[in-house]
Every structure is written in structure tokens, then in C-alpha cells.
Image (tube, helix red, strand yellow):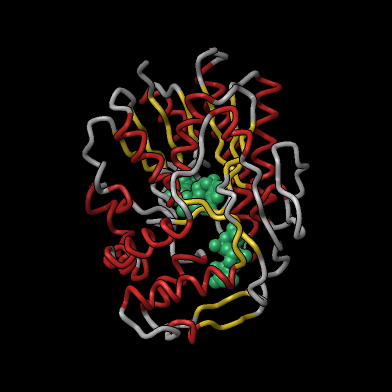
Amino acid sequence: MKKNILITGGAGFIGSHVVRLFVNKYPDYRIINLDCLTYAGNLENLRDVEHAPNYIFEKVDILDTNGLKQAFERHSVTDVIHLAAESHVDRSISDPLAFVKTNVIGTVNLLNAAKDFWKGADDRLFYHVSTDEVYGSLDHGGFFTESTAYDPQSPYSASKASSDHFVRAYANTYKLRTVISNCSNNYGPNQFPEKLIPLCIHNIRNNKPLPVYGKGENVRDWLYVVDHARAIDVVFHKGKIGETYNIGGFNEWKNIDIVRLLCQKMDEKLGRSAGTSANLITFVKDRAGHDLRYAIDASKIQRELGWEPSLQFEEGIGKTIDWYLANEDWLDHVTSGAYQQYYQAHYGK
Ligand code: NAD
Ligand code: TYD
């Protein structure tokens, strides 16, 4: 069946992998990438698909009610996959309101646009992409399941939890057909170097300090971004309406162990003697309210939809480092700000 799928946040890290997968795998679908290009939006991520006949870019802010309405009408949108968000916990600590605006009000704006345009049609889908951080912080035992009570601890996770609640409220109140997935930490190509793994790769390459918050004992559960995109494909096509699916790789690491692993692999790849990069590790003041541990129980999506990660962590980290080393231009454009001229230069508006 032909679909016109509006993917929000498609110029970002995860969104660009989702756009690429859908554009290449489903030539019958039209993929409308709607993104306002914040600091995290980078159209260089999509160079390889930007001329595909089934790909369209719309520079629109999800806070712009009229812009959304026009985009739905112009492209006869049949489905939404919503990834646009402010996504970095540290930024949410210094500017919580930006997160309320985009993640909460922007999501409600998008829900309204879909509800008003679809008018109760029974073959439409609003897919909301969310995070495991809505469940709060775990101690050393246990996993987040789909029935774990929400207990967000940072302004970022509070804003994402709120947006999840609004999606469920629209499903209940207006019978909007929705599905939600909550995923663990992603890593891989095209991640903005404010997040732990690309930041360390960038700093090791440039012999700069590797800031480890607190003692580096916090635990995250890491998934390769392409496996997340594959999971989104599966949930979009096979997920049950109204359901929630947790996505993760059963792959927990202490931050300090990740940083050490990156140092070791980068020493090998850069031909440095063993232990060189580890000298860059610098323990710094802890993040305020730093969640201790996230760990996803991803058995529901494995059991019910047949998805599982395709890459082991060591392989994924190796591919990730190789990508950043082979794409130094990408990192240089991001750190110099040159990537922000791409839209003007290529779309000429
Ligand atoms: P990102 O910060 O790399 O990209 C966000 C994208 O959204 C950018 O392209 C940005 O320009 C766009 N955007 C931001 N505000 C917008 C607005 N008001 N209007 C239109 N576009 C806007 O984020 P990411 O890491 O790719 O995360 C994507 C989604 O996945 C988010 O909803 C996030 O909460 C969720 N998520 C992320 C992770 C992770 O590890 N990164 C894990 C689980 C879930
Ligand atoms: P991050 O990549 O920001 O993702 P999130 O906060 O959503 O989990 O951080 C991953 C972990 O790494 C988190 O426990 C905070 C820690 N961290 C550092 O120790 N140093 C850093 O410079 C950054 C950005 C993160």
C-alpha cells in the first residue's frame, strides 16, 4: 500500500537512519522529512538519499501549527513517525523550558495536526518514538519493562514522559491510532558529539580531555542506531495499535568501561602505543541528579514482533569508530558550524 509518511526530526541522529532505511527499503512510500534544523539537525546526514524520488524535505518547526497543517495537506500525510525532540539531558538541565516547548507542546501540536487532518480515519498511524529514561533510574538489579511505572528524574525525561502521556491521552480521548516505543541509549554514525561516545571519539582524535562525570560508575544500555531504526520499521509495520514496545540490546556498560574501551580501540586504529589515550580520561563534577542505571527488558518486541539486535557491541563500536575516522569532514563541519549552511546551499531558500 502506498503511504505518505511524515518523519519528524529526520535530520537528527536517529531520524536520519530511519529516513534512510524507509527511503531505500520502501520505494512505494513517500517519506517527508519534517525538521526545523536546530543545532542537532544536519542535512549532511542524508546526502545519500536527498535526491531519491520518494524523499522530500520540509523545514518546519513542530511548534508552528499552521506550518504543520500545510505540510499534512500538501503531502496528504497518511502516517507519522515522530522523532523531533530536544534530546540532550545536560541541555535540559540548563534550559528546561526549551524541552517543554519542543517535546511537550510540539508533540501536542503534532497530535492535533494528525487528529484534525485524519478525522478519525481507521487506517492511519501516529508512532511516537520515546526513551527508556521515562522510567527513571534503576539500582543495581532489575530491568525496565513496558509496565514499569513512569518516574522521570531529569527535565529531559520529564518532558518525554509528558509527551508519552499526551499520545496515550489522544488515543483514549480521540481514538487516534497510536503506538509508542521506548528505547535505550543509541550509538553509531551521525551522533552529535555532545553525547558520550562521539564526544570521546572526537576528543581522543584531537588529544583533548575525556570528561567522565562523577566516578564513571553510571550504567547505560547501548544499542546500535541502525538496530533501533530496524526496530522502528518493525513496530511501524507490525506493532499493535495502542501498545508500547521497549527496545534495547541487553547491553549494559559502566561509563568508565566504555571510555576505556574507546581509548583502547582508538589507540589501535590510530597506531598509538597502548595506554596513550587513557591518559586523557578526566573525572569531572557529576551531572546534577545523574540517573544511576538504565536497563531495558526488550523481550516483548523480540517475542511478539520478532525483532532482535543484529550487531554485538564490540562490532558496533568498531564500526562507529571507523565511521567517525573515515568521515572527519562530518565532524569538522559539525564542530565548526559549517553544517548549518547546508540547507541554504542545497535547498536555496
Ligand atoms: P537529535 O537531537 O540528534 O535530533 C533531533 C532532531 O529533531 C534534529 O534534527 C532537530 O533539528 C529536530 N528538532 C528539534 N526540535 C524541533 C522542532 N521544534 N521542530 C522540528 N524539528 C525539531 O535526537 P536523536 O538522538 O536522534 O533522538 C531522536 C528521538 O529519539 C528523540 O525523540 C529522542 O527522545 C529519542 N531517543 C533518543 C535516544 C538516544 O540515545 N539518542 C534513545 C531513545 C530515544
Ligand atoms: P549521554 O550520552 O549524554 O546520554 P544520556 O544522558 O541520555 O544517558 O550520557 C551517557 C552517560 O555518559 C551518562 O551517564 C552521562 C555520561 N557522560 C559523561 O560521563 N561525560 C560526558 O561528557 C557526557 C556527555 C556524558
> Residue at 42% of width from left, 24% of height from top?
77
Q: Is residue 221 visible?
A: yes
Answer with the quarter of the image where residue 336 lies.
bottom left
> Residue at 27% of width from left, 64% of height from top?
326
Q: On the rendering, which quadrant does ligand 2 occupy?
A: bottom right
Q: Quadrant of the N terminus?
A: top left
**Which of 46 and 349 lies nearest the eye of the viewer?**
46
> Residue at 46% of width from left, 69% of height from top?
199
- As drawn, 344 above or below 284: above
**Residue 332 falls left or right of residue 307:** left
Residue 111 point in image, percent of width and height:
57, 30
**Which of 250 and 125 lies nearest the eye of the viewer?**
250
- As drawn, 83 above or below 213: above
Answer with the quarter of the image where residue 233 lies.
top left
Residue 39 point in image, percent of width and height:
43, 59
**Residue 61 falls left or right of residue 152:** left
Q: Is residue 85 visible?
A: no
Residue 174 point in image, percent of width and height:
66, 20
Residue 23 point in image, percent of width and height:
31, 34
**Which of 214 and 15 lies nearest the eye of the viewer?**
214
**Which of 199 and 114 lies nearest the eye of the viewer?**
199
> Residue at 44% of width from left, 21% of height from top?
78
User: Across the whole image, how many numbered discs are drawn on residues?
Assistant: 0
**Residue 71 falls left or right of residue 241:** left
